[in-house]
């Protein structure tokens, strides 16, 4: 073979390989740009989701504060309503106990004929 033909064939092969390498490099650059765009879009979506979740969290915290205040007010209202009733029940219990003692004393005087404190037989 001719040395010029060999060098032309080698040169053509090198040019083809260089073109293929450029094509591969361009394809990789497109893939990298697409990947970066996907990453940016994902970051943007994630930031939106995070912002929405943070808003929901703050709203939930505010609702909890309001519910705690409402609960405290309801408990205070309940105590204010029930305190007089509890006092009345306690007074009735004391009166009942006093009546039982009086009845017991009266029954004791009538059955055994003895004198009890505050009474005569």
Image: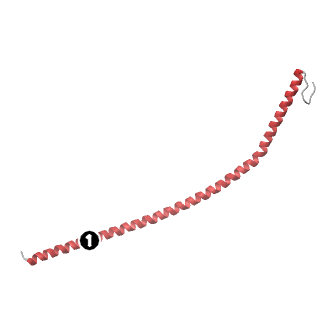
- Furthest toward the left, the residue is 1
Relative to residue 92, is residue 116 depicted above or below?
A: above
In this view, the residue in front, 116 or 34, is 116
Residue 34 locus on image (x, y percent)? 36, 68
**Which residue does the image show at 70% across and 49% down from the upper left?**
75
Res 17 → quadrant: bottom left
Q: How many marks?
A: 1
Residue 77 at what x, y percent from top left?
73, 50
Image point (46%, 64%), residue name: 45
Tell me the quarter of the image containing the N terminus.
bottom left
Q: Residue 58 location in percent, x, y?
A: 58, 60
Residue at far top of view:
112
Residue 69 is situated, as x and y percent measured from the top left of the image, at 67, 55
Determine whether, in the image, residue 28 is placed left or right of residue 8.
right
Q: Residue 61 is drawn in which quadrant? A: bottom right
Disc 1 target residue:
23
Q: Is residue 57 left or right of residue 16?
A: right
- Residue at 22% of width from left, 73% of height from top? 18
**Closer to us: 42 or 119:** 119
Up/down of 92 relative to 62, above or below: above
Residue 1 vs residue 79: left or right? left
Q: Residue furthest bottom?
A: 4
Label 1: which secondary element: helix
Q: Residue at x 33, y 67 (%)?
A: 31
- The C terminus lies in which quarter of the figure? top right
């Amino acid at each position: 073979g001719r040395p010029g033909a060999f060098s032309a064939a080698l040169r053509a092969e090198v040019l083809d390989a260089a073109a293929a390498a450029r094509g591969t490099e361009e394809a990789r650059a497109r893939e990298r740009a697409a990947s970066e765009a996907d990453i940016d879009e994902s970051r943007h979506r994630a930031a939106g989701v995070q912002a929405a979740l943070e808003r929901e969290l703050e709203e939930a915290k505010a609702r909890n504060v309001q519910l705690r205040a409402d609960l405290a007010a309801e408990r205070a209202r309940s105590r204010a309503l029930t305190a007089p009733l509890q006092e009345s029940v306690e007074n009735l219990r004391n009166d009942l106990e006093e009546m039982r003692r009086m009845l017991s004393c009266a029954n004791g005087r009538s059955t055994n004929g003895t004198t009890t404190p505050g009474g005569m037989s």
